[in-house]
């Protein structure tokens, strides 16, 4: 009996009655129903979030005054209602609590009363964070908690961008005003610097003039000292002259006073000598002019004495005034010297002031240059950039169209195993008749494998048709994807065949156990790196993980080399399983086993 004959015999057995045909068709449809229905149900769940009911409670009372009111809570609510990311339902707090409890909504989002106040507090003395309250109910749906957390995080980012943009706008406007004021300050310091330079020039001229004045007043002080000394000498001489004049005036006065007596004595003497009265008169007449001149001389002497006294008094006053002048000019000379020194210090200070003002002007000019000039449009763009500085540019080397297509490799690989497992419920792994009639383990093994492998190929063709045409999934390499699925089904058939050959009905059960192990280790949903260490080790051993990886590369347009490597691993599993099955069939053709003598309870 040849292999085609054994296959044909098994197929005839499978369609021997109408119920057998129905059973075969039903089992052939298992992977299509499992993979197709599951992927259809989960084709695009994220696109259906608009149907998820969520309660929105807005208790925010706002902030600001009557002229400048601000209610961030209302703004956020309006934005949420307009974007339609969920089926938002505005409710009161009590309504939302009741709706969450009875399952009317999946979660609630509450914007509390102090939401706007908290956001506005960032510019005050007591800043605090604003709160958005999320309440979930895992009794409704556990994933709703995760979805709600992500939704609130998006709201938080949106509010942060909005508030950050406003704050940055105010800051940039303030900087623009500061720049304008600094520019005015630069102009003012320029004018101040010009004034300081003028004051410096004036102080230099003042220092020079005060130096000349100091020199002049010093010379004047020396002259005044000499004048005071000369005046003192003149005053002393005048005092001596006045004393001599006073003596002369006294003697002249005495002479003038004695003149009448002398005239009488002279007349008496001449009379005694016998002169006549006429002679005496003649002599006295000659002497009278002399007496008159003497009297005049006395009068002149008295006047001269008065003048000399006045001269002496004036010289005394002159001497005293010259002394005061000498003292005053010395004080003036000292003051002029002090003024000159002060003017020099003023000149140095004005120079330092000018340098300082120059440095101030340069610093202010640098500050103006450091703050870029801007317009209202530029500040708005800058504020938006500051509020949201990072834009994530996402690019995919290989891309799945949606969530369902992202899961398709895993569920297609799993559906292939389920389909083969279901077929072995009605397909005989090994024909006992062939074992008895033939002594060719390899032909018996290939016949027992090819029947479910061909039926599994039909299953995979039906599954890829459903995925590609009914669900509209994209395949970058459709024939390659079909080839991987057929290869995976054939490999699964070889593995389950080997289990049945060696363990019988227990082997069929072990196929179920092996499916469960591959279900959790294939890395079809979460990355396999998240698995516990023992399970992560199984990922690198069991075949389903390689089926998933190969399908991903071929469906999404990934690395063909990786797909070929995965196929090589599947080929190794296929050959190894067939070899193991052949060894088991060889044993069955040569001797009876304990399982033949004592059948399994499951069988």
Image: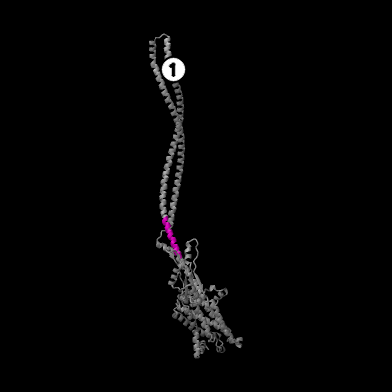
Taking the view exactly as shown, the residue that stands out farthest to the bottom is 17
* Residue visible at 41% across and 8% down in the picture: 274
Q: Is residue 173 left or right of residue 602?
A: left
Residue 564 shows in this picture: no
Residue 411 or residue 423, whichever sits in front: 411
Name which quarter of the figure residue 168 lies in: bottom left
The chief SS type of the magenta part is helix
Examine the rendered structure and indicate whether residue 353 appears above or below residue 384: above
What colouring style does the render use?
A: one colour
x then y, percent, for residue 520: 54, 77
- Magenta range is 163-181
Give percent across and percent down for residue 236.
Answer: 46, 27
- Mark 1: few/some/many CA within 10 Å (<14, 14-19, 20+): few
How many marks overall? 1
- Residues 334 and 73: in front is 73
- Can residue 175 be found in the magenta stretch? yes
Give whichever of 24, 168 is nearer the camera: 168
Q: As displayed, is residue 232 above or below residue 13? A: above
Q: x%, y% of residue 228?
A: 45, 31
Q: Please identify the quadrant where the C terminus is shown.
A: bottom right
Q: Where is residue 599 shown, x and y percent of the image?
A: 60, 87
Q: Can see residue 198?
A: yes
Residue that label 1 marks: 258
Element under disc 1: helix
Does residue 563 belong to the magenta stretch?
no
């Amino acid at each position: 009996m040849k292999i085609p004959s054994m296959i044909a015999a098994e197929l005839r057995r499978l369609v021997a009655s109408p119920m057998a045909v129905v059973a075969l068709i039903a089992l052939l449809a298992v992977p299509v129903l499992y993979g197709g229905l599951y992927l259809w149900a989960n084709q695009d769940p994220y696109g259906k979030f608009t149907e998820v009911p969520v309660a929105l409670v807005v208790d925010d009372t706002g902030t600001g005054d009557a002229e400048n009111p601000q209610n961030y809570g209302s703004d956020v609510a309006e934005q949420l209602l307009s974007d339609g990311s969920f089926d938002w339902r505005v409710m009161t707090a009590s309504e939302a609590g009741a709706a969450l409890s009875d399952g009317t909504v999946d979660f609630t989002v509450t914007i509390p009363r102090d939401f706007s106040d908290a956001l506005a507090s960032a510019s005050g003395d007591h800043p605090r964070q604003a709160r958005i309250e999320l309440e979930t109910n895992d009794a409704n749906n556990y994933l709703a908690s995760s979805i709600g957390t992500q939704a609130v995080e998006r709201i938080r980012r949106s509010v942060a961008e909005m508030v950050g943009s406003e704050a940055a706008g105010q800051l940039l406007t303030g900087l623009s005003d500061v720049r304008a004021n600094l520019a005015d300050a630069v102009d003012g310091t320029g004018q101040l610097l010009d004034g300081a330079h003028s004051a410096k020039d004036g102080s230099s001229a003042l220092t020079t003039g005060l130096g000349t004045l100091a020199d002049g007043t010093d010379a004047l002080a020396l002259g005044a000292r000499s004048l005071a000394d000369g005046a003192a000498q003149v005053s002393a001489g005048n005092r001596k002259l006045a004393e001599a004049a006073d003596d002369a005036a006294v003697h002249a006065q005495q002479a003038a006073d004695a003149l009448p007596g002398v005239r009488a004595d002279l007349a008496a003497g001449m009379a005694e000598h016998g002169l006549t009265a006429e002679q005496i008169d003649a002599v006295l007449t000659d002497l009278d002019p002399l007496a008159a001149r003497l009297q005049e001389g006395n009068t002149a002497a008295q006047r001269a004495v008065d003048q000399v006294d006045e001269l002496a008094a004036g010289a005394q006053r002159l001497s005293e005034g010259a002394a005061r002048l000498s003292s005053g000019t010395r004080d003036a000379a000292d003051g002029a010297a002090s003024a000159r020194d002060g003017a020099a210090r003023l000149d140095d200070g004005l120079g330092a002031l000018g340098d300082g003002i120059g440095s101030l002007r340069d610093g202010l000019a640098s500050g103006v240059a450091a703050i870029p000039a801007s317009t209202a449009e530029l500040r708005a763009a800058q504020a938006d950039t500051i509020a949201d500085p990072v834009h994530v540019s996402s690019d995919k080397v290989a891309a799945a169209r949606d969530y369902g297509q992202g899961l398709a490799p895993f569920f297609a690989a799993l559906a292939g195993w389920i389909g083969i497992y279901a077929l072995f419920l009605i397909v005989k792994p090994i024909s006992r008749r062939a074992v008895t009639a033939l002594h060719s383990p390899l032909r018996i093994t290939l016949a027992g494998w090819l029947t479910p492998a061909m039926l599994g190929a039909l299953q995979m063709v039906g599954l890829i048709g459903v995925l590609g045409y009914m669900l509209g999934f994209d395949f970058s390499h459709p024939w390659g994807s079909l080839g991987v699925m057929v290869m995976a089904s054939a490999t699964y058939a070889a593995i389950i065949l080997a289990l049945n050959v060696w363990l019988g009905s227990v082997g069929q059960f072990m196929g179920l156990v092996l499916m469960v192990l591959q279900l959790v280790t294939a890395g079809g949903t979460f990355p396999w790196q998240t698995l516990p260490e023992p399970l992560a080790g199984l990922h690198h051993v069991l075949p389903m993980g390689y089926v998933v990886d190969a399908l991903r590369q071929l469906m999404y347009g990934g690395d063909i080399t990786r797909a070929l490597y995965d196929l090589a691993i599947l080929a190794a599993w296929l050959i190894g399983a067939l070899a193991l099955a052949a060894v088991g069939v060889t044993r069955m053709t040569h001797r009876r086993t304990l399982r033949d003598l004592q059948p399994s309870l499951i069988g």
